[in-house]
Every structure is written in C-alpha cells, then in structure tokens.
Amino acid sequence: MKVENIKNIDRFFEVVDSCEGKVELVTGEGDRLNLKSKLSQYVSMANIFSDGTIKELELVAYEPNDINKLVNFMMNQ
C-alpha cells in the first residue's frame, strides 16, 4: 500500500509498533526494511523526510488487522 503525507511521524511509528505482524518499507530500489526495527525507523526517517512530513511511502503489511490499523491511521491523522 502507498501512504502519503504522514504529518504525525511519532503516531505513525506508534501504530507500526502496535502491529502484530511484519510491516515493511519498500525502498525505491525494491529493498524491504522492517519498520518494527528501531534502527530501520531511524534510517527511514533520516532518508525520507527533511521537513517533518513523510511525503510518500510504500508499505507492506501481512496481517489484515495491521492493514486496518494503518488505513485507519491514514484516514484519521
């Protein structure tokens, strides 16, 4: 799924941390980073945004409940 214009970065990572299964960030090169890893979160934050907003991410979540959490976050942020 593609997500756009994430303004509340802290809340986004709280939602990711609350997911039961893996949540992966797909890089432009096709690599997948486990977003539940704190190191991957810091690396992705440093590389993806510079003005406090994440413009666009491609995420892969494997559990239906996790997908619902992420979609709800995006709709209500």
Image (spheres, rainbow, N blue to C red):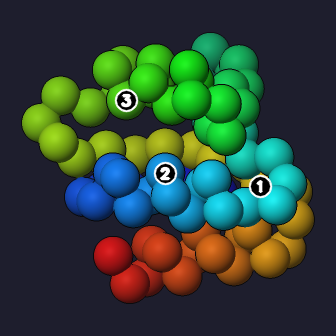
Front residue of 30 and 20 = 20
User: Mark 1 belongs to which amino acid?
Assistant: Ala
Please indicate, yes or no, whether residue 51 appears anywhere in the rendered image.
yes
- Circle 3 — which element? helix
User: Mark 2 belongs to which amino acid?
Assistant: Phe
User: Mark 3 belongs to which amino acid?
Assistant: Met
Front residue of 69 and 54 = 69
Name above or below for residue 40 compared with residue 77. Answer: above
Please indicate, yes or no, whether residue 28 appears anywhere in the rendered image.
no
Q: CA distance from mark 3 to mark 2?
A: 10 Å
- Circles 1 and 3: CB distance less than 8 Å? no
Question: In x, y percent, where is residue 29?
Answer: 62, 15
| Residue on which disc 3 sits | 45
- Circle 2 — which element? helix
Res. 75 mark = none
| Residue on which disc 2 sits | 13
